Image (cartoon, helix red, strand yellow):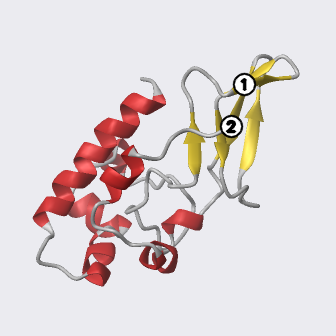
Amino acid sequence: MAYLDWFYEHGKKHKAIMDKLTHLSPMEVVQYFRFDNMVKNEPDFCPLYKNNKKCHDMKELNCYLCACPNFRFNDEGFNVREGRTLYSACSIDSKEGDRYISDDAIHQDCSKCKVPHHESYILRSFDRDWFEIMENVAPED
């Protein structure tokens, strides 16, 4: 599955959950997206949930910004650098992020980045219409 396809499918799941939580405050919504609660109450949100597995090694993982607002992608590639196609990057160049480089591709490696999974980060830019906002984020070079 191409990343863009995953992104839209994931966004639909996120929106369906948000539609159920209209009665909650922003803090309560963010708390609802805590990993332990999501595994229990939204088992179809993430394929890792069925094995109670986290995507990032952190004690207080929050899944609200699973599709990170700082991740930029282009399934066709942004450009070619030294013979390799750049497919994804971090718009804030997170110091916790890395790059996976193969013979012909460059991909952002977010596996060690925890930035969008901290509740304080989520609350600073919380918006109930997260998916509608993310749909308008154009891939960047």
Q: Residue at x 11, y 63 (%)?
A: 20
Q: Residue 64: x and y, percent?
A: 37, 63
Q: Are marks 1 and 2 in contact (CB under 8 Å)?
A: yes
Q: Residues within 10 Å of mark 2 (few under 14, many from 20)?
A: some
Residue 24 vs residue 58, the one in the foreground: 24
User: Is 82 displayed left or right of 11 in the figure?
Assistant: right
On screen, residue 114 above or below 49: below
Q: Residues within 10 Å of mark 1 (few under 14, many from 20)?
A: few
Q: Secondary structure at mark 2?
A: loop
Residue 74: give x, y in percent of width and height. Answer: 56, 30
Based on the displayed image, in which of its 4 quarters is residue 133 positioned?
Answer: bottom left
Q: Nearer the viewer, residue 112 or 49?
A: 112
Q: Which mark is residue 117?
A: none
Mark 1–mark 2 distance (CA, rounded to whole Å): 7 Å
**Residue 76 versus residue 11 in the image, above or below:** above
Q: From the viewer's perspective, is residue 103 above or below residue 132?
A: above
Mark 1 or mark 2: whose residue is earlier in sequence: 1
Which amino acid type corresponds to the residue marked 2 in the rendered image?
Asp
- Let me know if residue 44 appears in the view: no
Find residue 75 and report its horizontal and vertical position in percent: 54, 24
**Residue beneath the point at 66% across and 28% down:** 78
Seen at 59% across and 66% down, the residue is 115
As helix, strand or loop, the secondary structure at mark 1 comes to strand
Q: Amino acid at mark 1?
A: Asn
Image coordinates of residue 136 in percent, x first then y, are 41, 46
Image vertical order of residue 36 relative to residue 50, above or below: below
Outermost right residue? 82
Residue pictured at 68% horizontal, 37% vertical: 141
Image quadrant assignment for residue 18: bottom left
Side of 90 where 4 appears, left or right: left
| Residue highlighted by disc 2 | 141
> Which residue is tagged 1?
79
